[in-house]
Image (cartoon, rainbow, N blue to C red):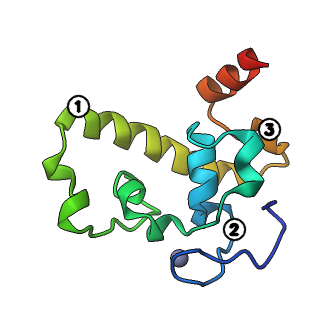
């Protein structure tokens, strides 16, 4: 889905995913979890509809979500939680920044993930 496209529906709740800062797919893309080649093949979801990832977003613009027991951060290793929170919160801030730019989609990921994809080519 390109930034300007309309009508991509969330696989979980069926509502439209309005913009990149609601997109779980793009969040995972900028933090290196989705291969650029596969981006257009993956289903779209709201960030909030994927609590296992969304629980790690620590940002004033993102209302923290309640998650069910199985995803609860308190059951996870604290160092793992810290690293995940840092990375995924950076990814979310990246999405907010991308809203205001005209970068090509290949430049969306955070720098360390950009380098990785480049070196594989
Ligand atoms: Zn949804």
Mark 2 or mark 1: whose residue is earlier in sequence: 2
Residue drawn at x 77%, y 79% as measured from the top left: 7
Asked which secondary structure carries label 1, the reply is helix
Residue drawn at x 56%, y 41% as measured from the top left: 33
Could you give the CA–CA distance between mark 2 and mark 1, rounded to whole angstroms?
32 Å
Asked which secondary structure carries label 3, the reply is helix
Residue drawn at x 80%, y 45% as measured from the top left: 105
Instruction: Please name whichever residue, 107 or 61, is drawn nearer the observer in this view of the structure.
Output: 107
Mark carried by residue 19? 2
Task: Identify residue for label 3.
Answer: 106
Mark 3 or mark 2: whose residue is earlier in sequence: 2
Q: Is residue 67 found left or right of 20 in the rendered image?
A: left
Q: Is mark 2 within 8 Å of ligand 1?
A: no
Q: Callout 1: 10 Å neighbours few (<14), some, many (20+)?
A: few
Could you give the CA–CA distance between mark 3 and mark 1, rounded to whole angstroms?
30 Å
Classify the position of the N terminus by image quarter: bottom right
Instruction: Establish if 43 lies above or below 6.
Output: above
Q: Is mark 3 within 8 Å of ligand 1?
A: no
Mark carried by residue 107? none
Mark 3 or mark 1: whose residue is earlier in sequence: 1
Q: Callout 3: 10 Å neighbours few (<14), some, many (20+)?
A: few
Q: Is residue 43 found left or right of 100 in the rendered image?
A: left
- x, y (%) of residue 45? 57, 68
Q: Is residue 96 found left or right of 106 in the rendered image?
A: left
Instruction: Establish if 52 lies above or below 49.
Output: above
Task: Identify residue for label 1.
Answer: 79
- x, y (%) of residue 67? 27, 67
Q: Which quadrant of the structure image shows residue 25?
A: bottom right
Q: Callout 2: 10 Å neighbours few (<14), some, many (20+)?
A: some
- x, y (%) of residue 106? 79, 38
Q: Which quadrant of the structure image shows residue 50?
A: bottom left
């Amino acid at each position: 889905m390109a930034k300007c496209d309309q009508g991509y529906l969330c696989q979980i709740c069926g509502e439209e995913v309005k913009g990149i800062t609601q997109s779980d797919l793009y969040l995972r893309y900028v933090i290196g979890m989705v291969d650029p080649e596969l981006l257009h093949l993956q289903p779209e979801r709201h960030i909030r509809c994927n609590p296992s990832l969304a629980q790690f977003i620590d940002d004033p613009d993102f209302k923290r979500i309640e998650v069910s027991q199985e995803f609860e951060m308190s059951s996870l290793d604290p160092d793992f939680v810290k690293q995940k929170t840092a990375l995924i919160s950076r990814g979310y801030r990246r999405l907010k920044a991308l809203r205001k730019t005209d970068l090509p989609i290949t430049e969306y990921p955070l720098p360390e993930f950009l380098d990785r994809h480049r070196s594989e080519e």
